[in-house]
Image (cartoon, helix red, strand yellow):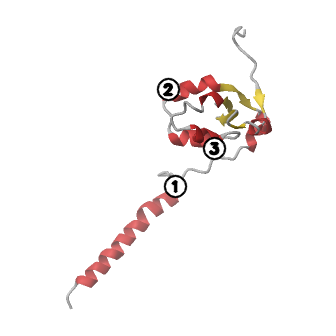
Amino acid sequence: MAEPSDKAVKYYTLDEIKKHNHAKSTWVILHHKVYDVTKFLDEHPGGEEVLREQAGGDATENFEDVGHSTDAREMSKAYIIGELHPDDRSKLAKPSESLITTIDSNSSWWTNWVIPAISALIVALMYHLYTAED
């Protein structure tokens, strides 16, 4: 049984969100949620311009790259006005693959250990030959 405080989710399309990319109406998408940050522009610790650059689009990757605090994440909930329409979620640019390699990756082992080890061996051999007396 739903509680009386539950509300229906308001969905916005990408086209609707893209229209809100100016100082009088600034919307951003974070993790498929739509935020109206217009009233927060002057208060943002990173400055208004940081939010304005992301206005009307998906700011998830940049938001996560900055490493916002738990307090900032909690405060951001006050600006949620809805969610990105499910049909438009696939239209968002996929985040680029992480450059962090894993131990299970063969290329990781090869590029992180073998090539530097061989290079160091070659440099040591060249140094030894250069400094050796005839």
**Residue 61 % position (x, y):** 60, 43
- Under mark 3, the amino acid is Glu
Residue position marked by numbered label 1 in the rendering: 105
- The answer for how far apart the CA atoms under marks 3 and 1 are is 36 Å
- Under mark 2, the amino acid is Asp
**Residue 118 % position (x, y):** 39, 71
For residue 103, above or below residue 127: above
- Asked where in the image residue 56 lies, by quadrant, the reply is top right
Is residue 59 visible to the viewer in this orientation of the structure? no
For residue 131, above or below residue 38: below
Residue at left offset 77%, top offset 31%: 12
- Asked where in the image residue 20 lies, by quadrant, the reply is top right
Q: Nearer the viewer, residue 134 or 74?
A: 74
Residue position marked by numbered label 2 in the rendering: 71
- Asked where in the image residue 85 lies, by quadrant, the reply is top right
- Under mark 1, the amino acid is Ser
- Mark 3 vs mark 1, foreground winner is 3
The local secondary structure at tag 3 comes to: helix
- The answer to which of marks 1 and 2 sits earlier in the sequence is 2
**Residue 36 % position (x, y):** 67, 29
- Mark 1 vs mark 2, foreground winner is 2
